[in-house]
Image (cartoon, helix red, strand yellow):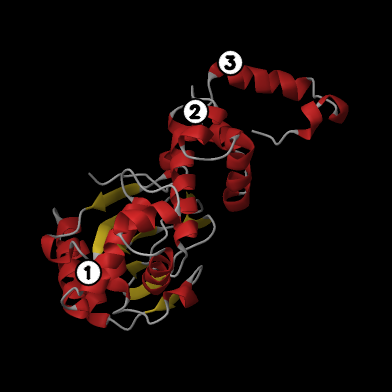
């Protein structure tokens, strides 16, 4: 089942948003398609914060096509006016046909010369009921024709992605390599060639996505428990990862999403009214 919000930091802020599975002919090439549609009042905007998957995205929007690389940090986009986008979260097997060096595209994007894809998706999105499904179908067919038959190396790259990012994912590159029956060096070459990131970077991103999900959706779980469940050494390690990528601490994120337990919220309010001095701050322990 396609998780509709994993990687989206503030789901309550989303406009109309759908994640659709890839059609059968594109199943080896696309993890899923994502389609936001928005109609924002004049003078207002909707900020969307995302800690994206360690993968490339091929996106059709406003008559143009772009290819976005994997990211190493959270990012945001402010939606205004009326619009839509149709994006394909690419599986590694699709990447080689679109770019030679995906590492060169990390944290950036390029335009793709594909006017026929832009036109076909735009027509489908304007076609009434079932428009999203039709857009996905034409997008999937175009991509399958562009990539061609999936070779063994590409399938191995897909398998590596599943071991690193899927259900019951590996906690270390060594574990992932063992499960794939390849060397760690081979695994590194696969992810560099087909994603542009190292296996360790992909694991860190998945773990942070899961942490954000648990911090937001399990308000009664303490941070030490979440950290242990996801393989962090302690909750301070989780906090450092949060701050490095998202720019905020887990407890702050929990409060901002409105998922903090009432007792914790009251405690934070009391603490704000009676702040603890540096000398009493438990030896400068990292903020939760």
Using the numbered discs, state the Cα–Cα distance from disc 1 to disc 3 in whole angstroms. Answer: 49 Å
Kindly identify which numbered label has been placed on residue 136.
Answer: none
101 shown above or below 163? below
Q: Are marks 1 and 2 in contact (CB under 8 Å)?
A: no
Give the crowd class for mark 3: few <14, some 14-19, many >=20 residues within 10 Å: few
Q: Considering the numbered disc 2 on the image, is that residue within a helix, a strand or a loop?
A: loop
Viewer-nearest residue: 50 or 35? 50
Residue 259 is labelled as 2
Q: Which residue is mark 1?
A: 121
Q: Please, what secondary structure does the residue beneath circle 1 have? A: helix
Expressed as whole percent of the image width and height from the top left, the position of residue 36 reads 33, 54
Q: Position of residue 174 (x, y in %)?
A: 43, 55
Q: Is residue 33 left or right of residue 26?
A: right
Residue 218: quadrant of the picture: top left
> Mark 3 sits on what residue?
263
Mark 2, other Cα within 10 Å: few <14 / some 14–19 / many ≥20: some
The C terminus - image quarter: top right
Q: Is residue 44 left or right of residue 279?
A: left
């Amino acid at each position: 089942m396609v998780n509709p919000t994993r990687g989206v930091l503030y789901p309550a802020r989303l406009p109309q948003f759908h994640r659709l599975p890839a059609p059968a002919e594109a199943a080896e090439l696309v993890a899923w398609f994502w389609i936001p549609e928005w109609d924002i009042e004049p003078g207002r905007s909707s900020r969307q914060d995302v800690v994206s998957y360690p993968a490339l995205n091929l996106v059709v929007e406003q008559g143009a096509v772009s290819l976005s690389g994997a990211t190493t940090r959270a990012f945001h986009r402010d939606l205004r006016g009326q619009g839509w986008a149709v994006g394909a979260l690419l599986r590694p097997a699709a990447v080689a046909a679109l770019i030679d060096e995906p590492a060169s595209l990390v944290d950036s994007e390029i335009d793709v010369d594909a006017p026929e894809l832009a036109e076909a998706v735009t027509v489908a999105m304007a076609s009434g009921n079932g428009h999203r499904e039709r857009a996905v179908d034409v997008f999937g067919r175009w991509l399958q024709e562009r990539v061609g038959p999936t070779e063994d190396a590409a399938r191995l790259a897909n398998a590596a992605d599943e071991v690193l990012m899927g259900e019951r994912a590996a906690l270390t590159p060594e574990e992932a390599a063992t499960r794939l029956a390849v060397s760690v060096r081979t695994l590194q070459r696969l992810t560099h060639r087909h994603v542009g990131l190292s296996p360790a970077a992909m694991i860190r991103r998945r773990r942070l996505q899961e942490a954000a999900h648990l911090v937001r959706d399990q308000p009664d779980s303490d941070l030490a428990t979440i950290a242990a469940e996801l393989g962090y050494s302690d909750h301070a390690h989780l906090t450092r990862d949060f701050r490095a990528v998202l720019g905020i601490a887990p407890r702050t994120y929990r409060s901002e999403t409105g998922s903090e337990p009432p007792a914790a919220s009251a405690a934070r309010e009391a603490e704000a009214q009676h702040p603890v001095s540096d000398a009493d701050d438990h030896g400068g322990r990292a903020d939760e």
